Image (cartoon, helix red, strand yellow):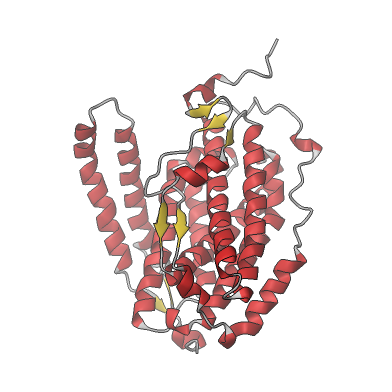
Amino acid sequence: MVDSLRKPQENTQLDELRPGVKAPSKDTLLTPRFYTTDFDEMAKMDMSVNEDEVRAIIEEFRADYNRHHFVRTDVFDQSWEHIDGKTRELFIEFLERSCTAEFSGFLLYKELGRRLKDKNPLLAEGFNLMSRDEARHAGFLNKAMSDFNLQLDLGFLTKSKSYTFFKPKFIFYATYLSEKIGYWRYITIFRHLDSHPENRIYPIFQFFENWCQDENRHGDFFSAIMKAQPQFLNDWKAKLWCRFFLLSVFATMFLNDIQRSGFYASLGLDAREYDIHVIKKTNESAAKVFPIMLNVEHPDFFKHLDTASDASLEVSKIGKAEQPKPLKLLRQLPHIATIGVKMIQLYFMKPIDMAPARGVVR
């Protein structure tokens, strides 16, 4: 007889803070980060140049189209023991990384709403409403983890994670891209599984169609803010920083997903083809607001990412070896250097200037 209360053998390798509570993954260059910023600088921002668009998006937030969307139905009420082995491990990691990223957004937006409440109430309302959405997403994902006998202690996560300081304009670049790439990731998975329901291994993917619209609206909010601050978009420094953040977001996703290609294979997706599609779509979306877009059609663009990804796999493989840390680091260094060289080559690949296509934001 199967003991439904016993954790599957594969879960024993996952570190736990206490029974049923997963220890947070160790921070690396590729893990989701928590952010803080200069709240005073953000409070002083004048939205008047693009206030109508900002208010229109906040009105959409108020409508709360997904108010009743994140409700677990009886389709979840079953055993998920058939998702086992490496697939189970990768799926739990997917849920954890997604939950951590959503919770990171919640903390940042909630703090912005609190700090800006009296000084910039328009932005404060927008951030508070977005924090509502991010809290729902994180809670829904954390509840999904409980179907695999694990959850994250989000309170512990709040206190234990280190926070990265970004100036407001960098927050806008990073979060805009995070929300837009999140939209394209979710809608692409949803559309694929809608066409191939036999690969829908877990019901959370059925929620992605409406879910991704939250991500899209959040991205539009940051786009509207940046348009109200043309100094973030119009000079040569903006072009360099936008290029940096586009490449950082795309490369991070690509290297992460290729390392976890088994998870995407379980959904009937090829991780590389999936990432190429998401990168191209996000690049097109970003071109509507950023002064440049990356030339992802250049014949060397994805070749460089492939080489960096191969090196990243080697770094990960060596990191798991039973060897002294200094020796592992020595073995990893050539591969880390390869990743660095490829990122430099990608960064200096000539981007596409969007100003002639749509005019400079004023």
Q: Residue at x 51, y 46 (%)?
A: 158
Above or below, 34 against 76 in this view is below
Taking 247 as reference, is 56 left or right? right
In the figure, 132 relative to 89: above or below? below
- Residue at the front extreme, as displayed: 118
Image quadrant where residue 130 sits: bottom right
Image point (58%, 77%), residue name: 224
Q: Quadrant of residue 82?
A: top right
Which x, y percent locates residue 361?
50, 86
Query: Depth check: 215 or 267 in front?
Result: 215
Vertical comparison of 251 with 125: above or below: above
Give left or right: position of 161 versus 1: left
Q: Residue at x 62, y 29 (%)?
A: 83
Q: In this rendering, is residue 114 above or below 89? A: below
Picture mark count: 0
Can residue 263 be seen in the rendering of this structure? yes
Relative horizontal placement of residue 356, taking residue 74 as reference (left or right): left
Q: In the image, residue 211 lies at what x, y percent?
A: 68, 55
With 29 as the anchor, is 190 left or right in this view?
Answer: right
Q: Position of residue 279 (x, y in %)?
A: 49, 61
Q: Nearer the viewer, residue 255 or 165?
A: 165
Residue at position x 70%, y 9% in the image: 1
Q: Is residue 264 visible?
A: no
Q: Could you tell me residue 142's position as x and y percent?
A: 62, 41
Q: Determine the image quadrant of residue 333.
A: top left
